[in-house]
Image: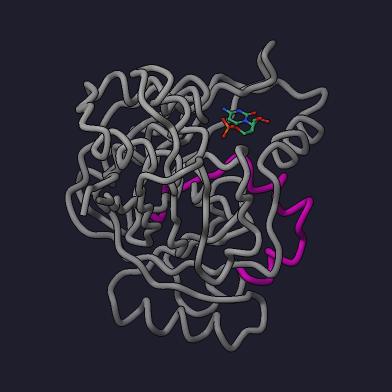
Amino acid sequence: MSVTVRVPAKVNVQLAVGAARADGFHDLANVFLAVGLYDEITVTPADALRVTCEGPDAAQVPLDRTNLAARAALALAERYDRDPRVHLHIAKDIPVAGGMAGGSADGAGALLACDTLWGIGAPRGELLDICAELGSDVPFSLVGGAALGTGRGEKLTPLEVGGTFHWVFAMAERGLSTPAVFREFDRLAEGRDIPEPVASEALLDALAAGDPDALAATVSNDLQPAALSLFPELADTLAAGRGAGALAALVSGSGPTTAFLVRDPGSAESVAEALRVSGTCRTVRVATAPAAGATVL
Ligand code: C5P
């Protein structure tokens, strides 16, 4: 018997970052949008807890107990007194260390898969609590759709989305570490007053209206200067997508994946092709949003 769960990637259409807190985290106003690129996590009873991974980036995925899928299985087993000896297989399509919550997706997916396999049927609130312990972006991976994340990003308010948004994503030649990008944010912010992070009303209206031009005019990412400082070549990727007619070009979360909002599927194809021939990225993917959260297949 096995259970497979499909979990989407995310892009942050707004990422407002406050000053570093005493615990080292940053308060955020984080507008998450789930996009239709997916990891699939399959859980099967086994002799020991183990993780395997397939996909183009599989070699970069840790298979030990630092993997969020393994940590999710252990956390759920502990809370509900179950046997954590399972095989977790990750079919990975979300870029690794890319700023698209790929690791978080695997945590949320493993949690829901084990909950189903073990017949627990844990209340949603319990699952969300475990997700928040695993990482700031993990609750959103479970929920999907669109949501405002406050606190360190884990306190979610669902958001209305009034249409389908078309995106192109450019994956970079190497990854970026999220803690390193936040440290660079702190370094660049030194001596400056950092305002409280707040969600943009205009951006929430644009999402609710399903209006790509209004969304393009309001997207923002406070981590983008830090990501560009650590990975200056990303400016060339952003310029290539803008030059090809993207309505907006931004770094996804802590990067280095870059995200391009486009008007329609035709424009997605032309921006994707321009990025492919630009020589400024490793691979290019087209996807729509919003996407459903973690789903048992
Ligand atoms: O919560 P998560 O484990 O995904 O966070 C990874 C790292 O990103 C944290 O250790 C921290 O350095 C940084 N971070 C932060 N503020 C947040 C979320 C993450 O500084 N709100």
Which residues fall within the magenta stretch? 215-237
Residue at 39 percent of width and 22 percent of height: 155
Q: Which sits in the foreground, 35 or 109? A: 109
Q: Where is residue 101 in the image (x, y as percent from the top left)?
A: 49, 47
Q: In this view, does 165 lie to the left or right of 69?
A: left
Residue at 72 percent of width and 54 percent of height: 228
- Residue furthest out toward the bottom: 277
Q: Which sits in the foreground, 13 or 72? A: 72
Quadrant of residue 65 within the rendered picture: top right
Q: In this view, does 239 lie to the left or right of 176?
A: left
Q: Which sits in the foreground, 228 or 297? A: 297
Q: Quadrant of ligand 1?
A: top right
Is residue 190 placed above or below 138 in the rendered structure?
Answer: above
Asked if the magenta segment contains residue 166, the reply would be no
Q: In this view, does 226 lie to the left or right of 44?
A: right
Across the whole image, how many numbered discs are drawn on residues? 0
- Residue furthest out toward the front: 47
Q: Position of residue 212 (x, y in %)?
A: 30, 59
Is residue 104 placed above or below 118 in the rendered structure?
Answer: below
Q: Position of residue 53 (x, y in %)?
A: 52, 60
- Residue furthest out toward the top: 22
Residue at 39 percent of width and 26 percent of height: 76
Asked if the magenta segment contains residue 224, the reply would be yes
How is colour applied across the structure in the image?
A: one colour
Magenta stretch: dominant secondary structure: helix
Q: Point out the image quarter for the C terminus.
A: bottom left
Q: Where is residue 9 in the image (x, y as percent from the top left)?
A: 41, 53
